[in-house]
């Protein structure tokens, strides 16, 4: 038996040579791991065609050097998420989840909570209708788990609490600092994104609440669009690049990512 076994989700997969695959796994115990699956395109017995995107599996592997590529030996599939794969909108949502994890996760940096979050959001996408709110929830929670949490608890400069800003109609978010800036302090700073107090409170609540309650939260149309702008700009600022899967989502589902039938009467 190979020495290592862990639960893993396939976040990237590409063919290599005649019969191999190079896979990026996000694993429960070791974080992001890149591996080679020798003969994966020939051996149904060892890999059961399980190395496609989204696959959640029990992975057995060798890791000779403790660095570089691991060698995937075999796997047992736990969930293959068939309903995601037959729905274009779900594929695009799922691809965005995978790309975000791939960009934020460091290689071989274990992050069990982030693994559980990804698995739970893929299950949710499999079982329920694809809703834009899910993208916002995923972004907020993943940013927190990878150490980029947007902090909207208090103004970064005068330290006034969000709860004490009741009378103001809007607040700001500083991309540079990743924190809230109140209306009064905003005059001294550039690169701020305006948002309503309600949206700031919602994002703060989502960062803190129990995972099992998160899917019940509702967004107003305003909160949805404000949080989208804030989170996408913040993610781009933090990672220094545009997410490819987000670009695809915008092109195919341009109106707030909701499906619109252009041939409607
Ligand atoms: Zn302030």
Image (cartoon, rainbow, N blue to C red):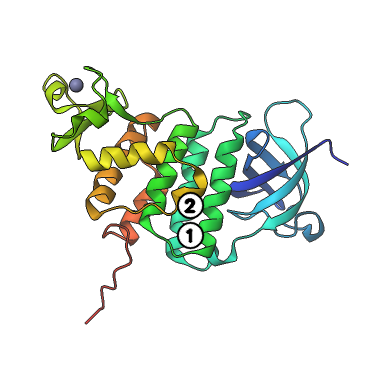
Q: Is residue 98 left or right of residue 183?
A: right
Query: Toward the viewer: 63 or 137?
Result: 137
Q: Which mark is residue 91?
A: 1
The vertical placement of 254 against 228, above or below, is below
Quadrant in which ligand 1 is drawn: top left
**Residue ID at (54%, 54%):** 122
Please say whether residue 106 is visible from this viewpoint.
yes
Q: Which mark is residue 183?
A: none
- Give the residue number, with chain letter if any, for mark 2: 95
> Percent from the top left, x then y, of residue 232?
32, 41
Q: Are marks 2 and 1 in contact (CB under 8 Å)?
A: yes
Q: Quadrant of the C terminus?
A: bottom left
Choose top left, top right, bottom left or bottom right for residue 185.
Answer: top left
Numbered circles on residues, count: 2
Estimate the spatial distance between the alpha carbons at disc 2 and disc 1, rounded to whole Å: 6 Å
Q: Is residue 131 left or right of residue 16?
A: left
Give neighbour class at mark 1: few <14, some 14-19, many 20+ (Cα, 10 Å).
many
Q: Is residue 60 left or right of residue 152?
A: right
Q: Quadrant of the N terminus?
A: top right
> Percent from the top left, x then y, of residue 137?
41, 46
> Percent from the top left, x then y, of residue 110?
62, 31
């Amino acid at each position: 038996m190979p020495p290592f076994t862990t639960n893993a989700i396939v976040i990237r997969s590409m063919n290599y040579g005649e019969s191999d695959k190079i896979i990026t796994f996000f694993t429960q115990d070791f974080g992001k791991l890149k591996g080679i699956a020798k003969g994966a395109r020939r051996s149904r017995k060892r890999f059961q065609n399980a190395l496609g995107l989204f696959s959640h599996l029990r992975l057995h592997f060798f890791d000779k050097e403790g660095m570089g590529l691991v060698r995937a030996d075999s796997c047992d599939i736990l969930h293959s998420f068939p309903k995601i794969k037959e729905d274009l909108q779900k594929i695009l949502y799922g691809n965005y989840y995978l790309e975000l994890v791939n960009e934020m996760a460091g290689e071989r940096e274990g992050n069990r909570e982030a693994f559980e979050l990804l698995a739970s959001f893929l299950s949710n996408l499999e079982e329920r209708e694809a809703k834009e709110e899910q993208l916002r929830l995923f972004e907020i929670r993943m940013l927190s788990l990878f150490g980029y949490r947007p902090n909207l608890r208090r103004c970064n400069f005068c330290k006034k609490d969000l709860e004490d800003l009741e009378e103001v109609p809007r607040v700001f978010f500083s991309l540079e600092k990743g924190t809230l800036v109140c209306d009064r302090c905003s005059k001294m700073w550039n690169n701020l994104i305006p948002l309503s107090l309600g949206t700031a409170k919602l994002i703060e609540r989502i960062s803190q609440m129990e995972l099992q309650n998160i899917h019940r939260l509702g967004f107003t149309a305003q909160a949805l669009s404000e949080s989208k702008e804030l989170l996408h700009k913040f993610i781009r600022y933090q990672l220094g690049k545009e997410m490819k899967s987000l670009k695809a989502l915008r092109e195919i589902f341009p109106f707030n990512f909701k499906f619109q039938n252009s041939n409607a009467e």
